[in-house]
Image (cartoon, helix red, strand yellow):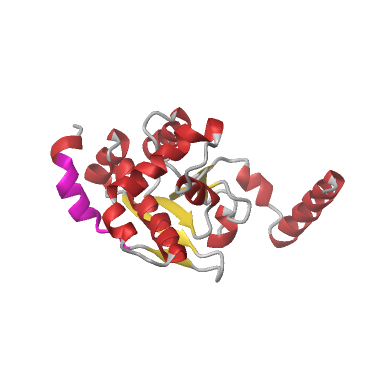
Amino acid sequence: MDLKKVFQNNEEWIKNKLALNSNFFDNLGKGQNPELLYIGCSDSRVTAEELMGLEPGEVFVHRNIANMVISIDLNVMSVINYAVEHLKVNHVVVCGHYGCGGVKAAIQSADLGILNPWLRNIRDVYRLHKTELNSIEDEALRYERLVELNVQEQCINLVKTAAVQKAIRHRGLKVHGWVFDIHTGKLVDLNIDFDNILKNIMEIYHLD
């Protein structure tokens, strides 16, 4: 990749934005007021704003390997806290994707060095759902189902946090689990039953 091309692309992007709205960058400079926090995968094929058709300033984004929400990861926890408590987003989305390399690596037995502690969290998702997953004979379908279940478990991890619980109770924050199908370009809403999930976990995870 010729990095000079990146700066040429940037100049073209600026021209295009100003041609559509001469105040575009003035408006960006006034601050942000996104309604959506998007937690997605770092995969280079899965860009947040582009796949949702959104513009700069419309979505607060956090990306990591396999779209994980891990309680001891200060990065993701800081993003969630800032987005929910300070930006007052109305929606939090965990978006996985089919063909996820992180999920695929987690179901293999290889020693991947520094990645092992991270991938262990995905392996725990497999352990929680191994009866269902092991009943799927087709390896590709089992892999896709693990992608979906991983999104579900990361949404549950979101709901375990104090900031999200308070925002759900006090102002109706919504949590969503989606999957991006890289083969079709479609976003798939997993329609996770959060009411039932909340009922089942609140005895243990409820925070005032």
The stretch in magenta equals: 191-202
- Is 198 in the magenta? yes
Q: Is residue 120 left or right of residue 171?
A: right
The residue nearer to you, when weighing 35 against 182, is: 182
For this orientation, the residue located farthest to the bottom is: 184
Residue 115: where, in percent of width, then height? 52, 35
Screen quadrant of the C terminus: top left
Residue 93: where, in percent of width, then height? 41, 52
Instruction: Kindly indicate the quadrant of the structure image that contains residue 142.
Output: bottom left
- Majority secondary structure of magenta residues: helix
Q: Is residue 40 above or below residue 207?
A: below
Q: Is residue 194 left or right of residue 181?
A: left
Q: Is residue 101 visible?
A: yes
Q: Is residue 181 left or right of residue 50?
A: left
Residue 75: where, in percent of width, then height? 48, 31
The residue nearer to you, when weighing 96 against 36, is: 96
Q: Is residue 88 visible?
A: no
Q: Is residue 104 left or right of residue 94?
A: right
Q: How many marks?
A: 0
Residue 54: where, in percent of width, then height? 55, 58
The residue nearer to you, when weighing 208 against 125, is: 125
Q: Residue at x 39, y 36 (%)?
A: 70
- Is 192 in the magenta? yes
Q: Residue at x 20, y 54 (%)?
A: 195
Q: Residue at x 56, y 68 (%)?
A: 183
Q: Is residue 113 above or below residue 10?
A: above
